[in-house]
């Protein structure tokens, strides 16, 4: 987990490394006047020396060779205004894009991240074309895409007779507050079934932050699933409010779960998978790593945990390309900060 987190942090840092703020340009201007070299300036503002060299070359006064803060900011602003929409797919952009793709970011997420940090980027379509061209030349970039070029049939309408779950409470009685997605602790739960229905993976997500928890379970037996839910949510217990499941018999032990976790338990209407849309979407993301017909008996708990951490670190468009871990932290400790959901 720590290694994976560091990989994501390094990628984010490299994307941001070449972008300079007004404050950093002011520091460059002052230190240049005081005679500091490129290395000293770079260390002062935590940038690579090459960034300083490029900044001085691009934004200095062409006549005097002097670097002035006001002129540098003005030239940077004008450059962004006049920047053509069509940008050449340079080696620099390819390197940055491929590093993020190899962290399993989608092309849309890659472009969003680069634009957020005001870095040169190309369109999502251009990036997809690069991926398919790479595939033609025996490259592996396509293997990091969610479906790896395959199409998946949307699930939800083919579930067979479920039976009646005793004392179930319909989603129609769930507080309307849950729909706002502005607080942590409103959850959705589901099972992903392995090959030949041998073993399953329990998935639980928070509707607001997108935070995901996963756990292998030996079967769909309701008592085992209920105990797994309780175990998985123990550290979130102080923040829990509601949980919503489909009508599978595996969730028949809902009363025990509700009592142990002090949470309100609701059930979606039959064949209304969109009522648990966040969970359905996350299960689709998980299938990138565990395609249908995967034998879960050969998947370790460690591998499941790695998938969980990868998805919790993956940036989301609806959060302005922040990741679920960051959003959860904001919801719990800085709730006045709003995110698009």
Image: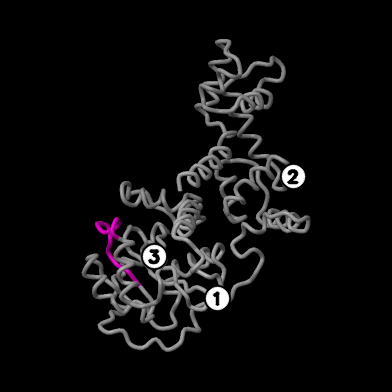
Residue 215: x and y in percent read: 40, 64
Q: Is residue 227 above or below residue 139?
A: below
SS under mark 3: strand
Q: Is residue 86 above or below residue 28?
A: below
* Bounds of the magenta segment: 234-244
The answer for how far apart the CA atoms under marks 2 and 3 are is 42 Å
Residue 154 bears which disc, if any? 1
> Height in image: 313 above or below 293?
above
Furthest-front residue in view?
298
User: What residue sits 28% from the left and 77% below the top?
Assistant: 253
- Front label number (1 vs 2): 1
Classify mark 2: residues with Cα within 10 Å, few (<14), some (14-19) or many (20+): few
Gap in angstroms between the C-alphas marked 1 and 3: 19 Å
Q: Is residue 265 left or right of residue 57?
A: left
Pick the front one: 180 or 82: 180
Residue 243, magenta (yes or no): yes
Q: Quadrant of residue 96?
A: top right
- Mark seen at residue 204: 3
- The tag earlier along the polypeptide, 1 or 2, is 2
Which quadrant is home to the C terminus?
bottom left
Instruction: Give the number of marks.
Output: 3
Residue 327 in the image, given as x and y percentages of width and height: 40, 51
Q: Which mark is residue 330?
A: none
| Residue marked by disc 2 | 88
Query: Closest to the observer: 177 or 39?
Result: 39
Residue 181 inside the magenta-drawn segment? no
Left or right for 188, reference 174: right
> Which residue lies at the image location 54% right of the left edge and 15% below the top edge?
31
């Amino acid at each position: 987990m720590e290694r994976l987190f560091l990989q994501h942090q390094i990628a984010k840092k490299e994307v941001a490394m070449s972008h300079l703020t007004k404050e950093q340009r002011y520091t460059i201007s002052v230190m240049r006047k005081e005679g500091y070299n490129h290395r000293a300036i770079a260390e002062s503002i935590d940038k690579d020396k090459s960034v300083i060299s490029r900044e001085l070359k691009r934004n200095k006064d062409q006549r005097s060779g002097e670097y002035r803060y006001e002129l540098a900011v003005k030239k940077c602003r004008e450059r962004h205004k006049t920047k053509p929409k069509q940008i050449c797919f340079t080696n620099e952009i390819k390197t940055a894009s491929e590093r993020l793709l190899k962290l399993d970011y989608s092309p849309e997420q890659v472009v969003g991240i680069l634009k957020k940090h005001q870095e040169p980027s190309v369109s999502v379509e251009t990036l997809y074309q690069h991926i398919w061209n790479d595939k033609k030349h025996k490259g592996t970039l396509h293997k990091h895409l969610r479906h790896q070029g395959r199409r998946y049939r949307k699930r939800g309408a083919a579930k067979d007779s479920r039976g009646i779950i005793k004392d179930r409470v319909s989603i129609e009685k769930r507080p309307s507050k849950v729909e706002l997605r502005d607080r942590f602790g409103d959850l959705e739960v589901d099972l992903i079934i392995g090959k030949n229905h041998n073993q399953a993976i329990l998935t639980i997500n928070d509707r607001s932050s997108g935070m995901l928890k996963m756990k292998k379970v030996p079967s769909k037996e309701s008592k085992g699933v209920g105990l797994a839910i309780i175990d998985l949510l123990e550290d979130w217990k102080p923040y829990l409010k509601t949980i919503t499941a489909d009508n599978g018999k595996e969730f028949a032990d809902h009363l025990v779960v509700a009592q142990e976790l002090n949470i309100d338990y609701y059930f979606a209407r039959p064949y209304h998978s969109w009522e648990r849309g966040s969970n359905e979407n996350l299960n689709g993301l998980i299938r990138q790593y565990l395609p249908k017909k995967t034998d879960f008996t050969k998947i370790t708990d460690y591998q499941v945990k790695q998938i969980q951490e990868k998805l919790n670190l993956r940036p989301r468009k609806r959060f302005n390309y922040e990741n679920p871990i960051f959003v959860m932290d904001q919801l719990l400790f800085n709730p006045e900060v709003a995110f698009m959901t």
